[in-house]
Image: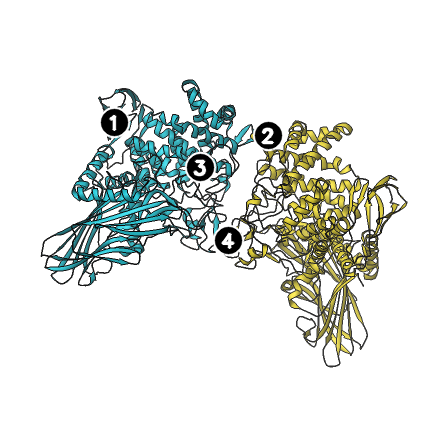
Chain colours: A cyan, B yellow
Amino acid sequence: MSWRISKEGFDPSSIELDGSRFLIANGYMGYRGTLEEFGKNELVACTVAGVYDRYDDKWRELVNVPNGLFVKVNYNNTLLSPMTFQDCAHTYGLDLKDAYYFRNTKFFVDKEKWIKIKTKRFASSTDYHLLCLEYSITANFDCEIEIETGIDCDIWEINGPHFKGMSFQKLDGIYVTRLTTNEGKNFAVAETADHLDNFIDKEYLRLYARKSKVKLASDKEFKFYKYMCVTHSIEFENPFDEAIKRINEAKNLGFDYLFEKHRERWQERWSICDISIDGDEKAMLALRFSMYHLLSIAPYHSEKLSIPARGLSGQMYKGAIFWDTEIFMLPFFSYTLPDVARNIVMYRVHTLDGARRKAKEYGYGGAFYAWESQETGDDACSLFNVTDVITQRPIRTYFRDKQIHINGDVVYGFFTYYNATGDFSIFLEGAAEAVFECAKFYYSYAYYKPLKDRFEILDVTGPDEYHERVNNNAYTNRIAKFTFEKAIWLYDILKEKYPNILQEIDSKTCISQYIEKIKEAEQKIFLQKPNEEGIIEQFDGYLKLEDIEVEKLKDKMLHPYEYLGGGNGLATQTQVIKQADVVVLLNLFESEYEKAILKANWEYYNGRTEHGSTLSYSMYGLLAAKLGKLKDAYEYFLKTALIDLEGNYKQYVGNLYIGGTHPAANGGTWMAAVFGFGGIRVEGTKVEMDPHLPAHWKSLRFNLIIHGNLFEFEISNSKILIKSTRLKNSKNRSYRIVANKSEFIHEIGQLLEINLKGE
Amino acid sequence: MSWRISKEGFDPSSIELDGSRFLIANGYMGYRGTLEEFGKNELVACTVAGVYDRYDDKWRELVNVPNGLFVKVNYNNTLLSPMTFQDCAHTYGLDLKDAYYFRNTKFFVDKEKWIKIKTKRFASSTDYHLLCLEYSITANFDCEIEIETGIDCDIWEINGPHFKGMSFQKLDGIYVTRLTTNEGKNFAVAETADHLDNFIDKEYLRLYARKSKVKLASDKEFKFYKYMCVTHSIEFENPFDEAIKRINEAKNLGFDYLFEKHRERWQERWSICDISIDGDEKAMLALRFSMYHLLSIAPYHSEKLSIPARGLSGQMYKGAIFWDTEIFMLPFFSYTLPDVARNIVMYRVHTLDGARRKAKEYGYGGAFYAWESQETGDDACSLFNVTDVITQRPIRTYFRDKQIHINGDVVYGFFTYYNATGDFSIFLEGAAEAVFECAKFYYSYAYYKPLKDRFEILDVTGPDEYHERVNNNAYTNRIAKFTFEKAIWLYDILKEKYPNILQEIDSKTCISQYIEKIKEAEQKIFLQKPNEEGIIEQFDGYLKLEDIEVEKLKDKMLHPYEYLGGGNGLATQTQVIKQADVVVLLNLFESEYEKAILKANWEYYNGRTEHGSTLSYSMYGLLAAKLGKLKDAYEYFLKTALIDLEGNYKQYVGNLYIGGTHPAANGGTWMAAVFGFGGIRVEGTKVEMDPHLPAHWKSLRFNLIIHGNLFEFEISNSKILIKSTRLKNSKNRSYRIVANKSEFIHEIGQLLEINLKGE
C-alpha cells in the first residue's frame, strides 16, 4: 500500500494543509485537495500555470479560476458535508500511482441509515486543459437527494480580484464563464455534468449551478461525472471555442477512458522515476509522495513555464519561480524526464530579456535574473517582502536587489541539465547567451581591491536571508566564479565550433569585449578559504558575530511569527542562519573540498541553522548522507520528505502566508536519496558511486537517464548492481563507472555488479 | 546686561537642563549648575576631563567625583531649599563675563521673616584643580541656623559605580577622600570650609559632613567659603599630597583673591573672543553664552585632552570626543585661542596609536580614528548604540565601524588649525604621520571599479546616521579625497624640506610605498556630481528613496523616543535625513561649488532634514547665511544658539539619555556669526569677506587671530572696518583682504575701511 496516502476523519484545522498535500495537477493547472462541496473559505483553488495578473498596486501573482467541479448534495434539506454533518465516517487522500484524489464519506442520517459519497478526480495528463470528477452516491435505504453542481466563481484570491470582467453562458448542458484579467488576458472555464438529469438552472451571486433531484434505491450506486476545462488566451486565440470543443470531447470520451489514458501516462512516468527501498516503507512512500508532486506540476507542455516555489497549490509566493527550481528540483527532472528538464532550463532563456531589464534598472551590465520570476522574467519580488508583526510596518528585505546568486543558480541549472543529458543544443538556442550575460553581470557587480589584487563581490544576500547585504558570501563568490568559468568554456567552444552563432551572440552581448576581463576576474575572484578549524566563513565577518544557540535566540522572540531577519531581526547580529548557505556551496562543489572540511562545516553550521526555510533540511541531509553521517542524514531526509505530509513547517513569515506545497523539498528528498544515500555523482558519462545506506535499508533501487540511456541501480550494503538500456534515439556510448576505488568501462546493455565488501 | 543669564523661580522639571546650562568648568573639570543642597537625584556632578573608567561590561565613560561643595542649611529643623520649601524667591544663573555661578534664594519662614542664601562659585581658571564657593546667609531677624557641609560621595553615575575603593580622612579641618577607579586610577578630592566654626563631624552613608550651629543677627550677613580640590594619578604621582597642598594654598589665598585672578584670566579671553552685535541683544547674549561654554571646557592645560560631545556637563556620550570637535568647535579656537586649538589637534596625534589599533582590528591599513574617542584613542563606541523603545532590544548601529568620515574630519581639523595659524610644527610633531595613516586607511578601504575606471568608497555611514551602510556618500568621498590631497602635499613638502623627518615617518608608515597609489586614488576617486537639477545625491540611490515629508514620517511614530534610523527605522527607506550631510560637504568645500548649486542643495535637503542631531541647525544656518538667505539663516542661527538656553532638543534617542551641553552647537553658533553673517573666508593670509547681516543688525564686531596677528572686524551694511595688531612673537607679515570684488594688501597695524555700497 505504499502508493496511497489517505487520512481518516475530518479536522477543520487541517483543511489548509490538506488542500496542498492532496493537490492534483498536470503542469498546466493545479486543483487543491479540497472537498467538492467546499468554497472560497476552505481555500478551494484551481491555479493556472504561467498566467499572472496584478490588481491595483498589490502583488502580481498567478491567477486562480472558478471552480467547475463544485458539487453539493443535500438530503432532507441538510448538506452532506463532514464540515457541518457531525455523524460521518470520512476518508480521503491521494492515489500516487494513478494520480487521483479520492474521498469517501459515509453520512449516518439515522441510526441505521447512511448515505455514502465517493469521489475520484484527476487532472488529466493527456489533455492538460481537463479536470475530471467521478461522483458516486449510495444509500442503504430508498431516498431522494438533491444535487447542486456548477461553477463556483467566488474565487479565493490573495492579491485579487484578478478578473475585471466575467460573463456566464449556458450551452446545451455546458456552463461556460468567460473571464478577463486586469491585465487583459482571457480565460474560458467550461463545465458539464454527465449522467445527471432533470435539473433546473439556478444562478446565485457568483455561483452558476444546476439542481437535480435524484431518487436513490437502497444499496444502488448512483454515479455522475463532471468535466472542467480551462483555456486561456496565451495559448489560444479563441479560448472560448477551445473550451467548448474540449469539454464536448471529454464528455464523449467519458471518464473511464480519460482516466485510463491518464493512468497509462503516469505508469510510463513511474516506470522511470520510481524508487523502491527494501526495508523502509515509510521512506518509500514519502519519496513517492515527493515525486508525485514534482511529476504533477512539471511543465510538460511548454518551455515558457517553469515550476513555482509553491508549485500549483495556490497563489502563495506570487506563483513565482525561484532558485528552488534549478538547485533543488532540476536534478530530479534532468535524470528522469530530460524533456521536462529541458523545458525548465529553456524557461530561463525565454526570460533573459526580463533579466536584462533588471540589470539595466540597477545600472549593471548583462542580465540579472529575477529573484521571483514570472512569465516575462521581470522581477515580481517587492522591496518590502515581510511585515513586522510587532509594528505592522513593512520590512525592507534585500532579496530582489542583493540575492545575486540567482544568476549563478540559473547557470548551474543549465549545466545540471547538460551534465545529465549531454544536450549541448540548449546553449545554441540561447543558454550560451544567457551564461554570457550572467557573467557580464557579475563582472559589473564585482569590485577590484588593488592592495589584495583580487576581485570581491560586495553587498549581497546569500541563501541565508537573515544576513543581508554581506560581503564576499562564500556561496555567491563561488557560483560567480562558476559562471565565469562556464562563460569562458562556452566562448572557446563556440569560437571553435560555432563561430557564426558566437558572432550572432556577440552582436547582442559584446561578449568578445568582455572575455579577457572575465578571464581576469575568474582568476582573481576571492573565495572564502577554510580557516584553521576548517571552517569556511559564510561571509566577511560572520565568525565574529554573536555565537548563540538557535533555541536561546528563539526564546527572545516576542511573537511566534516574528521575522528573524530584516533590518533589526534577532538573528541578524548572530551566527544563527536561516538555512543552508555554506552547506549549499559544499553540496554543489563537493569535489573541491576534502571530507574533513565538508564534515567540519556541516557540523559547525548545522548547530547554527534555524531551518527557517524548507530548502534547508535537504541540503543538510544530502551532505550528511554523502559523509556517511547516517543518523543525521536520515533524520534530515525524513524531515524534508515529510514537510508536506506532516505539515510541520512555518506557515507564516511575519504576516505573510507561505503555505502550499514544497516542490523544492520534494526535489531535495529525491537528491538526498539518490545523490546522498545512493552516493551517485555524475560527471558527463562518468558515474561515481559511494553509497551509504541507512542501516535498516536492505536495498535501494532507482533509475537514472544519463546521456540518453537508462540506468537501473540496485544498491545494497554488499553490492551495487547496474543495468543499462539504450533508449530511443540515444547514442550507444560507453560510460565509466567508479566505485569502491575501481573504475569500470560500461557498455549499454551490460549488467555490472560491484562488490562493496572488501577491497 | 547681556553678560548675565539668570532665571527666576524654582521648577523641579528644569533641574536637569539647568544643571547643564549653568555649568562652571575650567577644562580640567566641570561642575553642574545645581544647588549646593542638591544630591545625586538632582544630577549633581563634578566631571573630570580625560579620566575614563569602565565598570563591569557597561559603557566606559568619564568619571564623576564626590561633591565637595555640598552645603545644607536648616532653620528650625527645616531644610532651606526651594525644592522643599514652598514660600521662597529664587534666582540663579551665570555671570558669563566673570564665569561664575550664582544663586540667591530668600526663604520666607514666617509672614515677616526671611532668611536669604546667596552663593557664588567658580571653577578656577588659574589653578584648574580648584572649585571655590562663597556661601552667604542673611536673615531679617535674629535666629539660629544649622549648617551642614562636607563631601557627598553618593555620586550620580550613568554606567558606574566607578570607584572600587574609597576612603575618607580628616586632617586639620580638611576632608579628603581617596578614591580608586575600577581601572586603578587614583583620585583625591579634598575639601575645606573656611570661616565656619564650632562644628561637629558627622558621617552618614556616603556623606562626610560637619554640622555647625550659627547664630545670625538680624540683617547681618554671615559668610563662609568652601574650597574643593581634585587631583588624580594621571597628573600626579601622589594626588593626595597635591590635593592637601593646593587646598591649603587656596584657603590661604582666600576666595576674593582667587576670584580676582580667575576674573582677570577671563577678561583676557573675552578681550579676544567677544562678539558684539549692535541691534540684537538676544543674539549677542546667546553668542556669549555659547562662547562661555566653549571657553569653560577648553583643554588649556594639556594636549592630551580634547572636548567631549557634551563638554564636561556629565557622563553623557561616555565623555567621548567625536567629529564635533574638529568640524564644529575647532574653528572658534583656531581663530581666537590658537594655543588651545593646538592642544585640540595634538590630541589626535596622541591618540594615533589607538586609531592604528582600530584599523588593524578591522583589517585595514593605516589608522582609523575612533568614532567615540577617549584618552587612548581606542574606540568607546559600542556596536549597539541605541535601544529599540518598542521591543527593548539593542539596535545595531554602524557608527563605530562605518562612519569613516572621522578620519577626514581629523585631517580637516589639522588644516583648519594650520590655515588659521600657519603653524606647520604640528605636522612635524606627528600630524603629518597621522595624515599619512588616514590616507592609507582610505586607500585600503576603497575599491576600484574597472569598468568605470574609478575608486569608490562603499559601505559607509555619512553624517546622516539614519542611512547606514551606504555607498559613495558624497561627503565621505570628498573628505577622503581631501585626505589624499593633503597626504600628497605633505609628502612633497617633507621630502623637500624635512627629509629626515620623512624618513623617520616612513619607517613607521611605509608612506613612500603608498604615495603613488594614493596619487592614483586621489585622481580617480568618484565624487557625486550635481544632477540636472543641481542636486548632489547624498549617496548612491538616495534620490530613489521614498520622498516623504518629515512631519508625515513622524506621524507614523509609535513612540516619542523612537529611533528613526537603525536596521528598520522609519527614515531608513526614505529621503528623510537626520542631519546636515551634503550641506556639511558644501560648507567645508564651499569654494568648489557655484552659488546656484549651493542654493539648490540647501533647499532640497533642508526640506528633508529632521534635525535629529544638534549638529544640524548650524550647518544649515551657516550655508544659508553665506548664500544671503537671511531669514532662514537667522532662524537656524537662533535655533543653534538657543539649544542649551532653551533646551528644546531631543533628550533621548531610544532609551538613551543624551542631555548635557552642546559645545558643537556653541561652535556652530560662532561659525554662523563669523563665517556666515560675517562672511569671512580665510585661506592662509588671504581673507575674503562677503558679509550678509540680518536686517536688524546695525553692526557686527568680532576679532580673529590670523597667522598670529589680531584682526578686529567691524561690519555694517555699508562698510567693513578692519584693524590689525601685531601680537607677541608673531611675524609682521602682509595679508590680502578681498571684499566687494576688490583686493587690498593689508599690513599689520593698518586700518582698512571697505565701502560695501556701490561698486
Neighbor class of circle 1 (other Cα within 10 Å; few <14, some 14-19, many 20+) is many
Spatial CA distance of label 1 from label 4 is: 57 Å
Tell me the element at label 3: helix
Chain letter behind tag 2: B
Going from the N terminus, do you reach mark 1 or mark 3 first? Answer: 3
Say which element carries label 2.
loop
- Within 10 angstroms of label 2, few (less than 14), some, or many (20 or more) residues? few
Tag 4, which secondary structure?
loop
CA gap, disc 1 and disc 2? 53 Å
Name the amino acid type tagged 2: Asp
Q: Which residue is mark 2?
A: B453
Give the amino acid type for the residue marked by disc 1 in the picture: Phe
Q: Is residue B212 above or below residue B368?
A: below
Q: Amino acid at mark 4?
A: Arg
How packed mark 4 is, by other alpha carbons closer than 10 Å (few <14, some 14-19, many 20 or more), is some
Tag 2 and tag 3, C-beta contact below 8 Å: no
Q: Which residue is mark 4?
A: B393
Spot occupied by residue A533 in the image (x, y as percentages of width and height): 45, 34
Q: Which mark is residue A711?
A: 1
- In front: label 4 or label 3: 3
Instruction: Identify the mark at residue A354; answer none if there is no mark.
Output: 3
